Image (cartoon, helix red, strand yellow):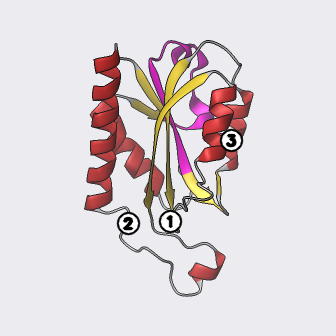
Amino acid sequence: MRVVIVCASVSHGNTKRVADVMGQALGASVVDPGDVDMAELATCDLVGFGSGIFSGRFHPRLREFVESLPTGERRRAFVFATSGLPEVPFRPFTRPLVRLLERKGFDVRDTFSCRAFDTWLPFKLVGGINKGRPGATDLAAARVFAEGLRDRIDAAS
């Protein structure tokens, strides 16, 4: 199975650490949206899309990248995020990106999010929140998520 993970990680490297763990589990390369080889992306069986959450939204670089993708054949995808605050059930921050990917023709199989160190404006005043996250437990959860996703996709093939 050919897999690539498109990851915008800009503040503290939180999302990149999660993406790297998922990439190891999936045998995937992790690339910044600006470095994606579109020909390689077109050959992938599974594509991951992730970033930190900024004011309740994915990073603009990731959103712009997904918006620029051509609408086309159905490919499998997953979405992941790191955030200082938890994802709330009545307004999940993953939903807008999932819907955009579905409009582009992706079959979004699952989403993952975990808490991470955050120094956004009000939190900066107290030295940030979630220091030490994503930690070992978060990274283990990311690995289990990726392995489960891989196993479900392999079983369906």
Q: In which quarter of the view is residue 149 placed?
A: top left
Amino acid bearing label 2: Arg
Q: Earlier in the sequence, mark 3 or mark 1?
A: 3
Distance of mark 3 from mark 1, alpha carbons?
20 Å
47 left or right of 97 in image: left
In this orientation, does residue 27 appear?
Answer: no
Look at the image and say whether residue 103 sits in the magenta stretch. no
Tell me the residue at 35%/40% (across/down). 22
Sort mark 3 into few (<14), some (14-19) or many (20+) by Cα contacts within 10 Å: many
Amino acid bearing label 1: Pro
Position of 113 relative to 6 (above/below): below
Tell me the residue at 41%/24% (across/down). 3
Distance of mark 2 from mark 1, alpha carbons?
13 Å
x then y, percent, for residue 64? 72, 38
Q: Give the residue at mark 1.
A: 86
Residue reaching furthest front? Answer: 90
Position of 118 relative to 45 (above/below): below
